[in-house]
Image (tube, rainbow, N blue to C red):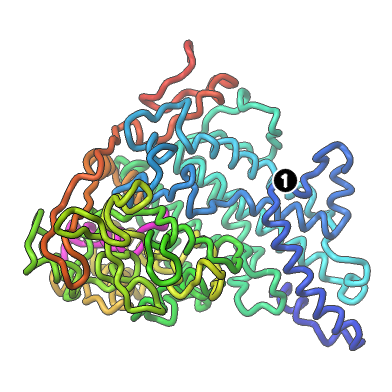
Amino acid sequence: MKFMKILAKKKDFKDLKVLKYLKYLKYLKIFIFLIIFSCQDFLDPEPDGSLTEKEVFSDPLRARGFLNNIYTYIPGGFYGIDGSMQACITDEAKSVKLTGGAVTMTDGSMSSRNFDESWTWSHYYTGIRKSTVFLENVDEAVFVTSQQQALNPGLNLAYQAQYKGEAEFLKGLFYFELIKRFGGAPLIPGERLLLSDDLAGYPRNTYDECVQYILECCDKAAGLLPNSWVGNVDEIMLGRASKGSAYALKSRALLYAASELNNPSGDVEKWKAAAVASKAVLDMPEYGLLDGKTKDWNESLQIWTQPYNKEVLFATAAGLNNDIEKGEFPRGLTFYDAQGGEGRTHPTHTLVKAFQMADGSDGSWAENGGAGTAKSLYANRDPRLGYWIYYNGIRQHARTANPVETGMDANGVPYTSGLNKDATYTHTGYYLRKFVNTSANIQSGADQRYKFWVIFRYAEILLNYAEAMNEAYGPTGKPDGYTLSALDALNAVRTRVDMPVYEKNKPVDQAAVREGIRHERQIELCFEEHRYWDLKRWKTAVEALNGPVLGIEITGSGSRVESWREFVVEKRVFTDKMYLYPIPYSELLKTNMEQNPGWEAPAGK
């Protein structure tokens, strides 16, 4: 690509003093980039009436800053539901918080006036507005200094093209985030929507119309962006959208569009389109499963701590910190701190029971058991169970052999990290381990790792492809031009963690493989904000989320386990109307838009 060649022209910089200057400029740019990403209101045009758009887009720092600010509207993950992970409104986890958004969204009290994610409606439309403003100005914008332009005359044009691609991608992503929550939404492709405006003049477009527009944004972006930024000579590009990001968004958007919620007639052509989109990602040589394997916990962790590794197609900006360890280390750890971490996310026994045995069989779980079975509860299971969940008896930290003790003694007194020791300890008998660097010292801040929220990764695309191919062509079908079947893609995810191929223990027919792919998504993508949307698009959320979530109560700990029993942590509510979020009540007061079925709307609307 011309842009990469332009950036690589270091031979143009004949003055060694200029090269030295550029070396320091690179780190200054990274510093500025991170600051801008962290400041949501920085460098908006005319934030206080003192700057015009012309002044913003004629200044390289402000012009880049405007685009960087748009990145702050991408989904952030981790604690996005009022301080809780989205996993806590699914059957994956229970939040340590006893009140707040995760409770409201699962206890039946959710309404168009009070649900926690109501902010996302205006949030993503603000991102869309800013993307539109940027695209209106990008062709005349200045992104380089006069000195840089003199050294490399084509550099500003290259930045204009690349940044235009990023803004198109971001606009498409924001629309997708809207429609997966609310269904069809008003499209405003060529007009600005100011914060003071309402949507009264904009009817809701259909879901399919919105998808088509998202695809157009992705295609525009893909035509302007490099395949990947990994290995690029200018490190400030890392963390930005690429062609791989745009293709990944197409893969997910078309998968959702083909699914039952949005494709009730089962139009197979939609599944074929989803397969084509996923194949486009899989055909890119820059991406793949990380090192082709995650054979142990540390290799699994690298997906979320090794910035811009080849499995990641798009993620938030990376920063060194121990924040997730502070948030998720089990309470009462004995190694560094008697209090441990905050233990904010408690995986459910419902999820733990979904992990297969290491030989690929489902295994069995009784509702209770004695010492003879309790000691081997977690033995010989899918290794991802130990990678991603702290269970009773697992090693608590990389620097100690002490186990996590979530049980209680014979008198009912909880051990160090024990069940319901108080309201801040595990409510389910488990703590979250995925994303967590177990070598971290949360007191001193030692051994920090890069942290970032992964929005698209290669394993998801393999499973998107597997699902689409199975629905379009069956488990083993491979039309001309396709080298992978649905089973091939499914097994690629399983075998990289030494799990046996699916067909070793399961029947190979379309319905059975459909369930196998859904199960693999439940395991591989747990806690990554897929489960909630998967259950909705499959129209299985009422079955999975309207009822109890389970925990486990263990008497004894580690090798001293004596007995165990399942128990109901809480009963959840999910009804048919919840397949779509309500349009926020406050928005309906300003517009004639129709409310989603079953939700409250202002009188007369």
Residue 506 visible in the snapshot: no
Where is 584 relative to 174, above or below? above
Image coordinates for residue 379, horizontal then vertical, percent: 18, 73
| Magenta stretch: helix, strand or loop mostly | helix
Residue range corresponding to the magenta coloring: 506-530
Tell me what residue is drawn at x 91 percent, y 85 percent: 17
Tell me what residue is drawn at x 31 percent, y 55 percent: 347
- The residue carrying mark 1 is 41
Residue nearest the viewer, comparing 444 with 390: 444
Query: For the residue carrying disc 1, how many other residues have a C-alpha within 10 Å: few (<14), some (14-19), or many (20+)?
Result: some
Where is 193 relative to 536, above or below? above
Residue 278 visible in the snapshot: yes
Residue 258 lies in the magenta-colored region: no
Q: Secondary structure at mark 1?
A: loop
Q: Is residue 408 left or right of residue 266?
A: left
Residue nearest the viewer, comparing 401 with 289: 401
